[in-house]
Amino acid sequence: MKPNEPSRTALMIARQRTAHQLLDHGSILDDPFALKILHEDEKDILQFANAHPLASIGRLFTAARSRIAEDALSGAVERGIRQIVILGAGLDTFALRNPHGALEIRIYEVDYPATQAWKRERLAEAQIAVPPWLIFVPVDFERDNVGEKLVAAGFQQNAPAFFTWLGVVPYLTQDAVGRTLDYVASIQNSEVVFDYMEPPQAFSEEMRELVTKRTEELEKMDERWASRFESAGMRAFLRSHGFSTIEDIGFQEIASRFGSVVQGLASGQAGLHVVHAGTGRIIP
Ligand SMILES: C[S@@+](CC[C@H](N)C(=O)[O-])C[C@H]1O[C@@H](n2cnc3c(N)ncnc32)[C@H](O)[C@@H]1O
């Protein structure tokens, strides 16, 4: 990440989410705020969505990981969890769409300070009011103690919490991922949904070319992929950081569950996974 500059990848993911509304009618993730917070022309978003024949795969994965996270989150709320933490929130709009507003839920959005400041500007420009349950917590996962920052913002460490961490783990060092997972696991009966990336060999040939191109683009933006895990390695990593229940959903399953509604979905295998992990028994 460039110091004092908002994340460029947060902007790209917000464009993917908006393209999903425009091209796929939000069939996986219905997000009425996606275009509003982005404040870009529909034609530019469509151009972005069609810039590469394999972009549809990224659009599918972006929408699906949010769907999986938000469904798991609803289950956690039904079980009584009232604290939600969105790690590396970018332009995520869950807090604006929160269907559990009547339940005295608190939503903590944790993000790189410059990205968070940019999001707040975007909200103000779009005249979207910050809902009363949303608390912003600026944090750099590489340098800060996420627990200390959350507690300073009012987070209750002795009450369970649900964490989402979408599109962030690949950009962090393994140390920062491990430290953050340690903190999540230190909260009794906590749960987390996040995604991770496998090494390039797990991608089909045409996808590998795209991964190489993206790696070069990210390098220029100062936002590089810093950690990759194989699925067995991720399972062991999670266990060593205190997680006892682990559901790992691979790309093939994601494509078969959600792919039919994505317009012109390209074929290809991606080494991308979504994990739902917990420290207690998660009742699906
Ligand atoms: C690809 S974006 C995903 C944003 C969001 N979760 C979404 O799905 O729209 C990556 C996010 O991770 C955040 N991020 C990356 N490195 C970070 C760091 N060291 N500390 C805090 N946040 C970081 C960026 O600010 C950005 O919001």
Image (tube, rainbow, N blue to C red):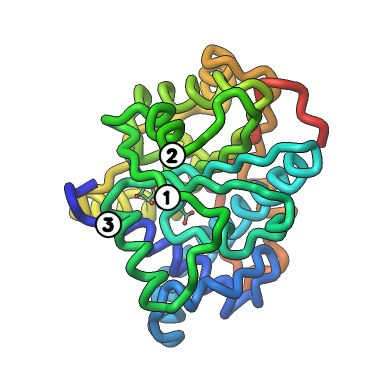
On the image, the x and y values in percent for residue 66 come to 60, 53
Disc 3: residue Cβ within 8 A of ligand 1's nearest atom: yes
At numbered mark 3, what does the secondary structure look like: helix, strand or loop? loop
Q: Dot 3 corresponds to which residue?
A: 6
Q: Position of residue 232 (x, y in %)?
A: 57, 21
Task: Classify residue 2 as left or right of residue 273.
Answer: left
Residue drawn 74% across the image and 43% down it: 77
> On the image, which quarter does residue 117 sit in?
bottom left
Q: Earlier in the sequence, mark 2 or mark 1?
A: 1
Q: Amino acid at mark 3?
A: Pro
Disc 2/disc 1 C-alpha distance (Å): 8 Å
Q: Nearer the viewer, residue 47 or 178?
A: 178
Q: Identify the secondary structure beneath mark 2.
A: loop
Is label 2 in contact with label 1 (beta carbons under 8 Å)? yes
Task: Give the mark, 3 or 1, whose residue is nearer the N terminus.
Answer: 3
- Residue 224 location, x and y as percent? 28, 44
Residue 258 seen by the camera? no
> Residue 153 got which mark?
2
